[in-house]
Amino acid sequence: MNSIEVFAGAGGLGMGLHSAGFRPLSVVERDPQCCRTLIHNIKGGCELVSGWNVENEDVQLKSFRKFDGDVALVSGGPPCQPFSQGGKHRAYNDKRDMFPQAIRAIREVRPKAFIFENVKGLDRENFRNYVEYIKLQMEHPEVLSSEGEDWAEHLGRLQQHHLSASRDGLNYRVALQVLNAADYGIPQRRERMFFVGFREDLGVKWRFPTPSHSRQALIRSQVSGEYWDKHSVSKIDLHGEVFPKLVEDSLSPWVTTRDALIDLPDVFDKEEPEALINHRYQPGARIYRGHTGSVLDLPAKTIKAGVHGVPGGENMLVRDDGSVRYFTIREIARLQTFPDDFVFSGSWSESMRQLGNAVPVNLAHIIGSSIYEHLGAIDAND
């Protein structure tokens, strides 16, 4: 099935969707460093970006109308700056907020489905009206704001249209949910909001895949000793982690940092192990308040786009002996479930920025496979 990807970044979302069966006709990304990474891997033969047409363009300047009728899925991770409730209430036209461009892509392409990812912060109480506004625009992308109309007035018209008994034009059924990547077998506690929509005329009833992994199951495997035996290590003090009362479930254990990095050698100096690209020691890691790193025997803390100070300080590993070091690029790529043959070019800090902004590849695959399955069922019945 054909797709297009906007705000592609380093390709995590697109790669997961590619592995689920979608083939992008266009991959649009404004950042030249991200484009260099993608193009390097396309030329290098990485399977999950095979055949991609990467376009180093500003989405705001690109028309998508030529894809109308030819695309099953539109996907992307639009940047979203803090939404201001003050001023003239015209934040939906703020150039820093790219959701209007994502919605324009839906309107111009008219895909069967779409998926967009964004920060968990949109789930905060003070963003509730904005999230509703985004969702309604996705559901009814042809109900445009009028000249001089502020966003609150537009929201009101969208709500009226949504409740109307008869709705003409392009409409979608949209589901949104905050997912924790660890609950789907990703070795990272990463919470992000996903918007998934299916065109209303298709009659698809869709819901997010149910979690396959749990913290409870990991705790049980550690309490029983099964986890420690698997790794041939003595039981480790998990550095003050407070565990809930155990409740039985049938899910698999959360995947830990140790699980993800088990076959990678530790790095103690600047020598990069032979045949392991992007696995090089980075000096300067230290613990201080609010900057404590990730222990081996839990999923990693959320990988951040920053590299120094509290925002990026969680991109740091706590060894069994309590010493700390920064994760290597290859280790972060593992925690984001990028394949080992995917290479990040450029500096350590630049690679960390790309990785910190990415969607875990395997999580994108899980959601994308469900979307692909539902769209395939429609095609089979046509």
Image: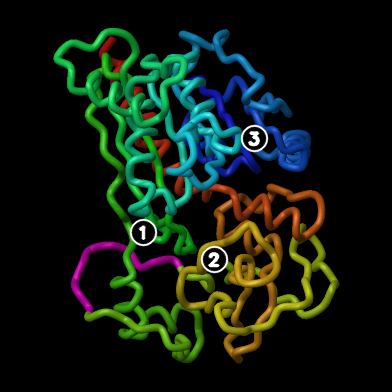
CA distance separating discs 2 and 3: 22 Å
Type of the residue with mark 2: Ala
| Kind of residue sitting beneath label 1 | Asp
Residue hosting label 2: 260
Please give the residue where the numbered disc 1 appears in the rendered image: 183
Principal secondary structure, stretch drawn in magenta: loop
Label 1's element? helix
The total number of labels drawn is: 3
Q: Residue 262's quadrant in the figure?
A: bottom right
Q: Distance between the Cα atoms at labels 2 and 1?
A: 15 Å
Q: What stretch is highlighted in magenta?
A: 246-255
Quadrant placement of the C terminus: top left
Nearer to me, 344 or 127 = 127
Position of residue 277 in the picture relative to residue 9 (left or right): right
Q: Nearer the viewer, residue 147 or 97?
A: 147
N-terminal of the pair, mark 2 or mark 1, is 1
The residue at 44%/83% (across/down) is: 228
User: Earlier along the polypeptide chain: callout 1 or callout 3?
Assistant: 3
At horizontal 37% and vertical 54% (from top left) the residue drawn is 124
Q: Is residue 92 above or below residue 79?
A: above
Q: Does 75 appear in magenta?
A: no
Q: How crowded is mark 2: few (under 14 residues within 10 Å), some or many (20 or more)?
A: many
Q: Position of residue 123 (x, y in %)?
A: 37, 51
Q: Residues within 10 Å of mark 3 (few under 14, many from 20)?
A: many
Of circles 2 and 1, which is in front?
1
